[in-house]
Image: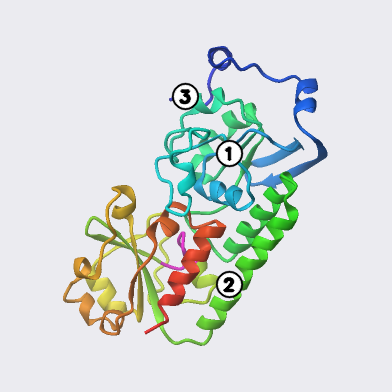
Amino acid sequence: MNNALPTSIFIILFLLTGCEPNTGAEMAKERPSVKAMTLNHSLGETIIQSTPKRVIALDMNAVDTLSQLNIPVIGMPKDFIPHFLPSYKNNSNVQDLGAIIQPNLERVYSLNPDLILISSLQATHYKALNELAPTYYFDIDYQNSGADHIEKINTYMLNLGRIFNKQELAQEKVATLNAKLKDTKQLITDRPESAMIVLHNNGTLRYFGVQSRYGFIYNELGVKPASQETATSAHGQPISHEFMYKYNPDIIYVIDRTAVMENKAAVNLDDLNNPLLKKTNAWKNNRVRIVDSEAWYITGASYSSLMIMLDDITQGYVN
């Protein structure tokens, strides 16, 4: 599919759907006048002239953030909706825009949005989308979340609060998240245990280290990595049970990608049973934790997902 649709197709889509581009006067009647704002991000800048009324969110972190602020969306991908956002799945007022990685651009254009929210998963479509409507890019790094992951999430929540005149609610959410983050850090501080974050995918294993999509867990929360391997990857570094035995983590967090991608029940300890794994401190001390894979894998950069992730991490430090 060509990301940037020709002008002729754009016009046809509007005619087919009975939608015509609003003139400036029409838009002024439909929306309250607000002070214009410019939001800078790594793909450019997003200029908001008035409070958006027709919002499309192509990233599930954006959907969750809008949900926390009580902001409706008119369209979103529905291929992977986490369990903590159930109301969107069968909502006929929310158009299904296909896949998170490859959204249906024809459907996006037909909805005539006035704000589009994307992340790096849809970054290749930024130019085409931004020509249709102001497109705000969420600067989350799924390759290496680094030490500013939480700050970016807070900024995103606060900026959406500004856009929709929900500043007070956004500040409350940020304060609640940061309080939980502080409690988790206090629990972890000075703890000697080392930890390993592992992705399970149809029997294979991948390791997420200090330079990965979950790097912030080590860099911001203070979790001690069992291994200093630094391969940067969105899907982790392939490992074996020998790798886990070698570095002998005290805590193992298991993300079950198979459960997410194939809509299956989550893996359990019996499924993971292996002679080498059973020799690790984590297994011997019953500290292998099967985490909420939808929160960790589908999102991982929103209010709800982080609250769940912090609970999962805390459980690793409980015998």
Q: Which amino acid does label 1 sit on?
A: Val
N-terminal of the pair, mark 1 or mark 3, is: 3
Cα separation between marks 1 and 2: 28 Å
N-terminal of the pair, mark 3 or mark 2, is: 3
Q: Mark 3 points at which residue?
A: 2
Residue 62 lies, in percent from the top left, at: 56, 47
Answer whether residue 224 is visible to the viewer in this image.
Answer: no
Q: Which residue is drawn at 54% across and 63% down?
A: 146
Answer whether residue 191 is visible to the viewer in this image.
Answer: yes
Compared across the picture, whether 51 is left or right of 141 comes to right
Q: Does the magenta stretch include residue 212?
A: yes
Residue 73 is labelled as: 1
| Local secondary structure at mark 3 | loop
Q: Residue at x 44, y 87 (%)?
A: 192
Q: Name the residue under label 2.
A: 180
Q: Does the magenta stretch include residue 288?
A: no
Which residues lie in the magenta part? 209-215
Q: Which amino acid does label 3 sit on?
A: Asn
